[in-house]
Image (cartoon, helix red, strand yellow):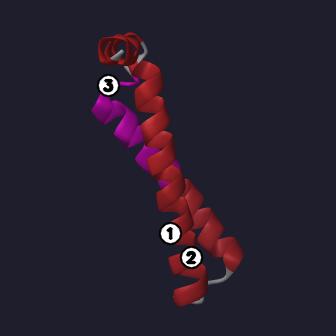
Amino acid sequence: MRERINNAIRNNRSFVTYTWVGIFMMILQIISLYLFIDLLKIPTIISSIVIVGGIFIFKFIIYKWTGFTR
């Protein structure tokens, strides 16, 4: 069973990379928005633009680092 799971992960490496990067970025976005809006009291529209734009660029950098994009 374990070998079957390992083979599935190896065969679908791109999907696994895409999934874990997506989950990490989603958690990072939630934490960042909470920090900016609730703790730093920065207006929502400004916080959203900065965080979503920053995470978009950061996600691209992570994909380049992991080899997902070529």
Q: Find disc 1 in the rendering and name its residue.
A: 31
Is the magenta region chiefly helix, strand or loop?
helix
Q: Earlier in the sequence, mark 3 or mark 1?
A: 1
Do tag 1 and tag 2 residues touch (Cβ < 8 Å)? yes
**Magenta-colored stretch includes residue 63:** yes
Q: Find disc 3 in the rendering and name its residue.
A: 67
Q: Is residue 69 left or right of residue 44?
A: left
Q: Nearer the viewer, residue 23 or 46?
A: 23
The amino acid marked with disc number 3 is Gly
Residue 34: mark in rendering: 2
Residue at 30 percent across and 12 percent down: it is 3
Q: Is residue 15 left or right of residue 3?
A: right
Secondary structure at badge 3 equals loop
Total number of numbered discs in the rendering: 3
Up-down relation of residue 34 to residue 14 (above or below): below
Q: Which residues are magenta?
A: 55-69
